Image (cartoon, rainbow, N blue to C red):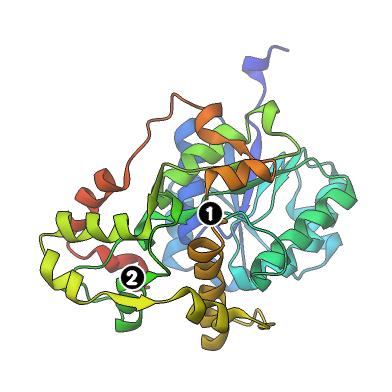
């Protein structure tokens, strides 16, 4: 039988209805190189987001990360690749899925990372992701670890017309540290395009890959937003400054629970900001020091996008804060 007659590999995406999951599903479908299935809790099978997935050609497989290995093995029937995009609070619950994947012979797993690279002991949430990576390697599962830097959607100050919560606006009005540390940024909507290429590439097997589209400082991002939005003076006046010392005080000794509480969200955010803006962990240089492959070098044919180019579409939207209102 020729390869042309073989069915396309089946990719299971837990967390397919989230922002990152939706991007991944679109990228996989658009590549026309994969069949896609979504792991959906039974209670969510009738929700609009699930119906949208089904209408796009995604197979819906009912199950839960907490169902146990025997049931998860059934969910994985015929699955070649797992790309997990579960919520941050569900990351510790991925272990049984990967145990089941080992038993049924899944060919590659991608755990839920899709954030910034970094060392242990700075961000408790990142430490949990690294523990999952260790677990996968201990199982001997073929894998790829993918980080994407910071979303472009989270890099620009929101215009005053946005109906996003005030706490979100304050976050995006904030300039951390000196504002001069370079940051890797990626358009959320492009993550799936890179993922589809990465998981089809034998060079990325058992490697970590950093996806990025532009590298800017926090101050540069603010200036881009102020210039492109047309609200320069207003947005500049709304800037909030948080010093490196203030960030350090906010994260030192923090051992928060991954419980989805408001306090956990605040602590997680402070950890991200400290990692990026003070320690400088969200840079291409640092990712390469950690052994990451550079997606831009692997796939030079994928068109890049600068933050300024993204900003033009961002500020032309009716409400650029739509990502924060669901």
Residue 191 visible in the snapshot = yes
Task: From the image, state whether disc 1 or disc 2 is nearer to you.
Answer: 1
Q: Is residue 276 left or right of residue 140?
A: left
67 left or right of 260? right
1 and 2 marks in contact (CB < 8 Å): no
Assign a secondary structure to mark 2: helix
Q: CA distance from mark 1 to mark 2?
A: 17 Å
Q: Is residue 232 above or below residue 204?
A: below
What's the residue at 62%, 56% (across, down)?
A: 113
Q: Position of residue 245 (x, y in %)?
A: 51, 78
Quarter that holds the C terminus: bottom left
The part of the image, by quadrant, that contains residue 268 is bottom right
Q: Nearer the viewer, residue 32 or 325?
A: 325
Q: Residue 77's spot in the image, x, y percent?
A: 76, 46
| Residue 216 x %, y % | 38, 50
| Quadrant location of the N terminus in the rendered image | top right
Closer to the camera, 295 or 45? 295
Relative placement, left or right, of 62 versus 274 is: right
Decide if residue 161 is in sight here. no
The residue lying at 13 percent from left, 64 percent from top is: 232
Q: In front: 285, or 84?
A: 285
Q: Which residue is mark 1?
A: 282
Q: In the displayed structure, would residue 322 be above or below residue 245?
A: above
Residue at 73% x, 69% y: name it.
92
Find disc 2 in the rendering and name its residue.
Answer: 172
Say what secondary structure mark 1 lies in: loop
């Amino acid at each position: 039988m020729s390869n042309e007659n073989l069915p396309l590999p089946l990719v299971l995406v837990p967390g397919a209805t989230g922002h990152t999951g939706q991007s991944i599903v679109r990228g996989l479908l658009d590549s026309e190189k994969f069949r896609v299935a979504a792991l959906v809790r039974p209670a969510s099978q009738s929700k609009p987001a699930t119906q949208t997935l089904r209408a796009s050609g995604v197979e819906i497989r009912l199950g839960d990360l907490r169902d146990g290995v025997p049931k998860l093995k059934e969910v994985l029937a015929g699955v070649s690749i797992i790309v997990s995009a579960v919520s941050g609070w569900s990351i510790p619950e991925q272990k049984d899925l990967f145990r089941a994947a080992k038993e049924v012979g899944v060919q590659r797993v991608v755990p839920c990372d899709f954030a910034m690279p970094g060392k242990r002991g700075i961000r408790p949430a990142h430490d949990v992701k690294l523990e999952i990576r260790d677990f996968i390697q201990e199982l001997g599962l073929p894998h790829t670890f993918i980080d994407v830097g910071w979303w472009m959607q989270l890099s620009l100050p929101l215009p005053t017309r946005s109906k996003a919560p005030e706490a979100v606006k304050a976050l995006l009005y904030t300039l951390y540290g000196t504002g001069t540390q370079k940051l890797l940024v990626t358009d959320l909507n492009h993550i799936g395009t890179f993922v589809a290429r990465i998981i089809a590439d034998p060079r990325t097997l058992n490697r970590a890959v950093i996806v990025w589209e532009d590298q800017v400082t926090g101050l540069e991002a603010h200036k881009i937003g102020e210039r492109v939005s047309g609200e320069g003076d207003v947005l500049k006046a709304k800037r909030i400054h948080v010093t490196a010392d203030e960030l350090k005080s906010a994260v030192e000794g923090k051992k928060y629970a991954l419980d989805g509480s408001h306090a956990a969200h605040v602590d997680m955010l402070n950890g991200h900001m400290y990692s990026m803006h003070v320690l400088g962990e969200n840079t291409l240089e640092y990712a390469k020091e950690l052994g990451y492959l550079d997606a831009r070098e692997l796939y030079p044919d994928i068109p890049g996008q600068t933050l300024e180019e993204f900003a033009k579409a961002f500020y032309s939207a009716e409400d650029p804060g739509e990502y924060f209102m669901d």
